[in-house]
């Protein structure tokens, strides 16, 4: 026997719809993603690294960079993904 939706579950459903619509308003546009810088500079312990624009296999857009830096006399490998929030959902 199916249970009738109560007032509370209808309110929750409306709140969820409102959150989705609010998130969609905040998503970056395709133009914003296309206009984003092609490279950004990262600084690790005073040493600069470059990250280039990338579309990740997940569909998200951002920058990816890696390189070596010396920290306290130790050579370290740095790898960084910077993902634009909501870029995967942008059509």
Image (cartoon, rainbow, N blue to C red):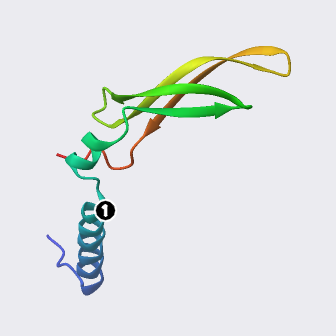
Q: At numbered mark 1, what does the secondary structure look like: helix, strand or loop? A: helix
Q: Tell me if mark 1 has few (under 14), some (14-19) or many (20+) residues whose alpha carbon lies within 10 angstroms of its own.
A: few
Residue drawn where x is 81% and y is 15% of the image: 74
Residue found at the very far bottom of the displayed protein = 7
- Residue located beneath label 1 in the image: 26
How far across and how far down the image is residue 59, in percent?
A: 27, 34
Residue 7 placement: quadrant? bottom left
How far across and how far down the image is residue 24, in percent?
A: 25, 61
Q: Looking at the picture, does residue 15 appear above or below residue 36?
A: below
How far across and how far down the image is residue 4, in percent?
A: 17, 79
Q: Report the front residue among 90 and 30.
A: 30
User: Could you tell whether 81 is left or right of 1 in the image?
Assistant: right
How far across and how far down the image is residue 55, in percent?
A: 31, 30
Q: Could you tell me if residue 82 is visible in this image?
A: yes
Quarter of the image that includes the N terminus: bottom left
Q: Looking at the picture, does residue 55 appear above or below residue 22?
A: above
């Amino acid at each position: 026997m199916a249970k009738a939706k109560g007032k509370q579950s209808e309110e929750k459903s409306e709140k969820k719809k409102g959150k989705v619509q609010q998130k969609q308003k905040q998503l970056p546009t395709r133009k914003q993603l296309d206009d984003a810088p092609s490279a950004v500079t990262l600084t690790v312990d005073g040493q600069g690294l470059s990250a280039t624009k990338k579309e990740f296999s997940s569909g998200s857009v951002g920058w990816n960079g890696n390189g070596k830096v010396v920290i306290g006399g130790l050579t370290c490998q740095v790898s960084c993904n910077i993902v634009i929030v909501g870029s995967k959902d942008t059509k």
